Amino acid sequence: MSALEDDVRDLQARYDDGLTAEAAGSEAYAVLEEFLDALEAGQVRAAEKRGGEWVANEWVKQGILLNFGLRSIQAHHHGGVDYHDVLALRDTADLSERGTRNTPDGTVVRRGAHVGGDAILMSPSFVNVGAHVGDGTLVDSCDTVGSAAQIGDDVKLGANTLIGGVLEPVEATPVVVEDGVSLGAGCRVTSGFVVGEGSVVGENTLLTPRIPVYDLVEEAIVYGELPPECRAFTRFVESGVGDHDLFDGGAYKPAVVATDVAEETLEATRREDALRDD
């Protein structure tokens, strides 16, 4: 257990005992600032893969929540606009030093978010507190990367993609998109869903634990995860209420179909690599 983890756990205990934002002193805020710096540097993460499974770091998620519970709303100024929040936006001066680009003028990165090297953030896009965006990843226009979401290296988030945030409960694993994944435009990934490494997901696909994934490679139905190295897309399957009098011709519900990634599918994703050339 690190000294920072000890400090966050101690601060959580004080908060549980009634510590308020008004009563928190400079020592408490020093811990909160150190914690946010560690998140931004990628030194701590809201979830990690252990033994092949993604597991939430509860103390990290507690630290994120403490930054809301122990801070008061303040006025901030950015880009000629006044806004009111408990957290300021992240200082992005370090991004260019690592080859990362963020385009004007609607790229918003909140304090406590990690953005790796050689990444691209297109405007408008939003990366929330506690999110981890890996090296070489593209966050396209109108994308949202939710609080504590874990996005791997060399990921492509198509335009208008939503990656949901999961802060509470602290033991719940956030949304995870592993290395090398390509999400088509308009995809939605929510509620702690894990997208396996190297998968290619068709546009407008909803990935959530409540929707089944029909894995045609392993001939299995899984929930809450997309297996690695798959091509996935939305299909509609017959619903259990299909015979109801209210539904003429039957009702259908969404499902996700996962198959092997075809070479032509991989080639289509490689063409976008030109975006990363200087």
Image (cartoon, rainbow, N blue to C red):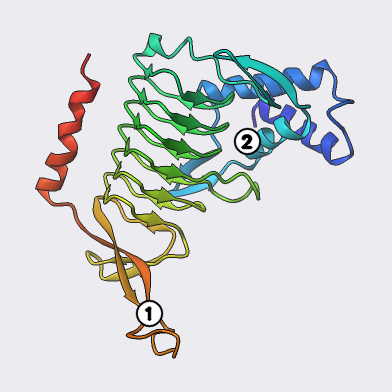
Depth check: 88 or 117 in front? 88
Residue 27 vertical placement versus 18 (above, below):
above
In this view, the residue farthest toward the left is 264
Describe the element under mark 2 as helix, strand or loop: helix
Q: CA distance from mark 1 to mark 2?
A: 43 Å
Q: Residue at x 54, y 44 (%)?
A: 165
Q: Looking at the picture, how far across and down is residue 31, in whole percent?
A: 72, 21
Q: Looking at the picture, how far across and down is residue 121, in whole percent?
A: 38, 25
In the rendered image, the quadrant that contains the N terminus is: top right
Q: Residue at x 46, y 37 (%)?
A: 144
Q: Mark 1 or mark 2: which is in front?
A: 1
| Mark 2 burial class by Cα count in 10 Å: few <14, some 14-19, many 20+ | many
Q: Earlier in the sequence, mark 1 or mark 2?
A: 2
Residue 271 vertical placement versus 217 (above, below):
above
**Residue, disc 1:** 251
In the rendered image, the quadrant that contains the C terminus is: top left
Describe the element under mark 1 as helix, strand or loop: loop
Depth check: 277 or 151 in front? 277
Q: Looking at the picture, how far across and down is residue 154, in whole percent?
A: 30, 32
Residue 152 vertical placement versus 174 (above, below):
above
Q: In the picture provided, is 72 more to the left or to the right than 76?
A: right
Q: Looking at the picture, how far across and down is residue 25, in whole percent?
A: 85, 19
Q: Amino acid at mark 1?
A: Ala
Residue 108 vertical placement versus 69 (above, below):
above
Q: In the picture provided, is 90 more to the left or to the right than 32?
A: left
Image quadrant assignment for residue 2: top right
**Residue, disc 2:** 60
Q: In the picture provided, is 69 more to the left or to the right than 150?
A: right
